[in-house]
Amino acid sequence: MNYRHAFHAGNHADLLKHALFDAALGQLTQKAKPLVVVDAFAGSGLYDLRLDERADRTGEWRGGVARLWEHRIDELAGPLGPFLQRLQSWNPIDAEFRWYPGSPLLALAGMRRDDKLLAVEKHPEEHERLAQRLAEDPRGRVYQEDGWTALTSFLPPTPRRGIVLIDPPFEVPNEFERLTKALASGLRRWATGVFALWYPIKAGFDLGAWEASLTNAVGEAPLLNMALNVAPSGEAGLVGSGLAVANPPFGFDQDAAAIGAHLETLLAQPGAAGFRLARLRERL
Ligand SMILES: C[S@@+](CC[C@H](N)C(=O)[O-])C[C@H]1O[C@@H](n2cnc3c(N)ncnc32)[C@H](O)[C@@H]1O
């Protein structure tokens, strides 16, 4: 386990994942009933982009959240507004951007009093930090376990309403296959759960084949796939990322299309494919 999210926090891929995750949670909380968020690869929860030298070493956040922050006054009134408001709760609007929240803190910020968060993080130090950050909030539970195993043992949760976020570090070659297997078995255990799967896009990525295996994994469940390419497809490293969402909440696809279009305008370089949303399986 060499992966540390501090090197990548606030990059373009985090922005896509987190803005869409926040929008999905926003739609789910429109209904009065309580819900559960399962964060299977939770990370440490909050990242200091100014003083943690790992963020500076890659500088990835400068091509991500720094650009959004630069345009925050214009973007606040648009589809990225709700996500920007979340970021503002850690960063005053008139200050330089410093604190980037990870998925468990974003989840808590979007949840209501009776909602629950089950956050799983295997790495001892990351787990310890997250446990400290969530210690004061009775809605959050942190587990130092294997996220893949938790996707079996924690599902279906009580209450049976909510969302699962699956964003492993992609350190091993079969991670894409593991994702689709986890999606298929997760849906067998919890057919009505919302499943959000994040994945990286690098040179040679076959979007058609990936979408075919996602579609195959979900059976009859509705499925959306969102991909944002910010660099030309032949470049080295992470040229983009995607989020596939099974059982998307009602209204989420429109939010996602608008968020993706704005992120493309802010983040995509000339020659990049930009944002694309595919409705791979429609609601019956
Ligand atoms: C991409 S990062 C998570 C980012 C976080 N979900 C967010 O959006 O802010 C992946 C995390 O998974 C953790 N991890 C790696 N292998 C794991 C495993 N088998 N089970 C649970 N966590 C794992 C890593 O330590 C890392 O913190």
Image: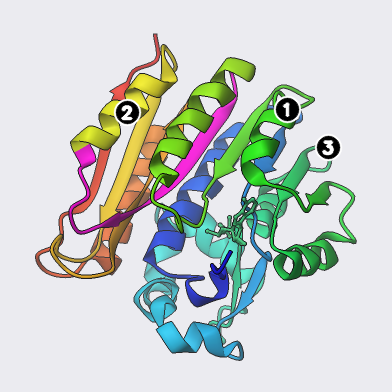
In the picture provided, is 233 more to the left or to the right than 132? left
- Camera-near label (2 vs 3) is 2
* Residue depicted at 61% across the width and 91% down the height: 51
Q: Quadrant of the N terminus?
A: bottom right
CA–CA distance between discs 1 and 3? 10 Å
CA–CA distance between discs 2 and 1? 34 Å
| 196 shown above or below 218 | below
Q: How many other residues sit within 10 Å of disc 3, few (<14), some (14-19) or many (≥20)?
A: few
Spot occupied by residue 66 in the image (x, y as percentages of width and height): 42, 78
Q: Is residue 278 visible?
A: no
Residues drawn in magenta: 190-207
**Residue of label 3:** 114
Describe the element under mark 3 as helix, strand or loop.
loop
The disc labelled 2 sits on which kind of residue?
Ser
Which one is earlier in the sequence, the residue at label 2 or at label 3?
3
Spot occupied by residue 268 in the image (x, y as percentages of width and height): 23, 65
* Residue depicted at 29% across the width and 59% down the height: 240
In the picture provided, is 107 more to the left or to the right than 127? left
* Residue depicted at 90% across the width and 50% down the height: 138
| 120 shown above or below 89 | above
Q: Cβ of disc 2 within 8 Å of ligand 1? A: no
Which one is earlier in the sequence, the residue at label 2 or at label 1?
1
Q: How many marks?
A: 3
In the picture provided, is 102 more to the left or to the right than 240? right
Q: Quadrant of the C terminus?
A: top left
**Residue of label 2:** 213
In the picture provided, is 142 more to the left or to the right than 212? right
- Confirm or deny contact between disc 1 and disc 3 (CB under 8 A): no
Spot occupied by residue 184 in the image (x, y as percentages of width and height): 49, 23
